[in-house]
Amino acid sequence: MPHYALSWRNPNERLFDISIRFTAPEDDPLLWLPAWRPGRYLIMNFAANVREWSANLRKVGKSAWRVGAGRGEEVEVTYRYYAGVLDAGSSFLAEDEAYVNGSNLFMCVDGLRGEQCVLEIATTWPIESQLPGLVARDYDHLIDSPIIASPAMTVHSFDESGATIHLVFRHGRNTERFVEPVGKIVREQAALFGGLPLHEYRFLYHAGDRWHGVEHEDSCSIIVKRSVEGTDHFLSITSHEFFHLWNVKRIIPAAFVPYDYSRETPTKLLWAMEGITSYFGDLTLARCGIWSEKQYLEHLQHEIELLENSPGRHVLSLAQASFDGWLHDAMHDRANAWISFYNKGELVAALLDLELRKQGRSLDEVMQTLWRDYGQTGRGVEEDALERIVGLPEFFARYVDGLEPLPYAELFHAAGVAFVSRPRGASLGAKLKVSDGALMIDTVTRGGAAMSAGLLPGDELIAINGTRTRHAGDATRAIHAAGEREIEVVFARAGVVDRCALTPRADGSVDIELHVIEPENALRREWLRSLNDRVH
Ligand SMILES: [Zn+2]
């Protein structure tokens, strides 16, 4: 049984000391570190942060080492890992905290992946983790279990739907206010799947400068954006991560069974894992009464606006975006060639649910079937399984595999909701950002004025019609003043100042509105009603 030990010396060095003791399963045993972690479908090369490994380790590949030992020999290897970046999937060491994500920290002894393993942490601080007694049933379980050790944590525990739920906060005041709404979320989602498939669940919250969440089997880790007031986004991301305990942690694409941590494993089901999770995450808030119907429709309206203003929807299907998720970071023209499979996936899920409801079925039932046939049996979800269960090949051909405009008007109408799309007026056709005091072109829209004039992302916008542009607002005012007349743009590219003529024009952007036209609509009532109301 591999024995992992974690300790540290000077927290300001941000270096974890890791030791692994094991019995060599073969001559010259191989140890490897994952190149990516479940939940983030991108090669991250955690081995880049490994240093000062023991003399008995010999590096033999990008993320692989061998130990000079004979089969059956007792071996101990040590190494250090730099842990100075805090996000939901990283490891982080500070003077009052050790935050551990094993996927980036712990090497696997090849040949012992399926064996139970033990972790020892050299600290007297309280520890919060989904791993009971820090014993994992195998390597995959070990690295799926984030751990916080810290003398400064606030924990609220409560029982709901037959399980004990722990809200663990590293930072934050007035955290008791989250207990009641999180309880409602748990109850609502448990009702969908006929109960919780676990006895304990932990939400691990840190504060940070952006929102970020990662799902795990019996826990999730969430970074809460410090500067945001209100609870809407907090509950939305909480609900999303909780839904993942079924969708992706137990209902798992066959491409991930077992996980190959060494390389990309593309699947066109990422939209179903992330988009359907986003859909049910926010639908849960409406169903259990945290959001009003109006708030939920406003949320969908915002998501539709995001997609309909993404030029990439004309060239990249939802299935292809899922399959190519691994390439997202390497892509140079994301503004025109990429769509978010979270965003379009959520909308396709919503429309699919409405289409099914028109036929007296629902996406709830589809999830229940996936849970019964895959989640509860451990069978991986085949690439065509969702389409097979849903049984609407034309819908999938058009909106999942194809590029057809989504049928918002027709399907929202069935729910008594009007869909209105209004084209926006003439614009620059570019997104701007201020960087080091300079107004820069961040992206240019295909078919827009800036692209026609030859402007490029990275150009500095200096003046429009002789007026200095320092902020995005200066450019917007100058464009509005021009109407659709030609303007002169002075810009700098690679240190050379140049000018071009540009004629503002509409770039296909739209404003979207969803509003209720039928106050009493049976389909909408059933769609947004709490499942717990139906039981009682
Ligand atoms: Zn997710």
Image (cartoon, rainbow, N blue to C red):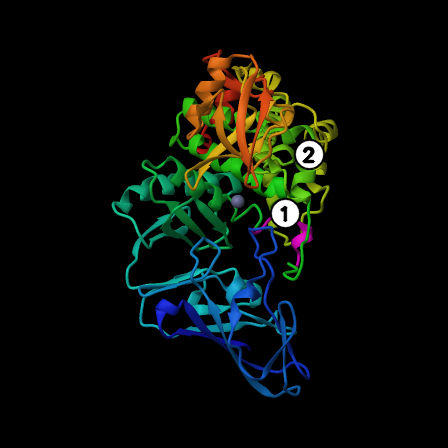
* Bounds of the magenta segment: 249-258
Q: Which of 460 and 146 lies nearest the eye of the viewer?
A: 460
Task: Looking at the image, tell me whether mark 2 or mark 1 is earlier in sequence order.
Answer: 2
User: Element at badge 1?
Assistant: helix
The rendered magenta stretch, by its main secondary structure, is classed as loop
Q: Is residue 292 left or right of residue 482?
A: left
Amino acid type indicated by mark 2: Leu
Say which mark, if any, is on residue 65. Answer: none
* Residue drawn at 43 percent across, 33 percent down: 285
Q: Is residue 255 magenta?
A: yes
Say which mark, if any, is on residue 316. Answer: 2
Between marks 2 and 1 in the image, the one whose residue lies nearer the viewer: 1
Task: Using the rendered image of the protein, determine whether residue 142 is visible from the camera's viewpoint.
Answer: no
**Relative to 507, does residue 277 appear above or below in the rendering?**
below
* Residue drawn at 55 percent across, 63 percent down: 46
Residue 457 lies, in percent from the top left, at: 57, 36
* Residue carrying label 1: 330
Q: Which of 466 and 524 lies nearest the eye of the viewer?
A: 466
Q: Which of 505 and 11 lies nearest the eye of the viewer?
A: 505
Residue 235 lies, in percent from the top left, at: 40, 39
Label 2 to label 1: alpha-carbon separation: 16 Å
Amino acid type indicated by mark 1: Ala
Mark 1 residue crowding within 10 angstroms, few (<14) / some (14–19) / many (20+): few
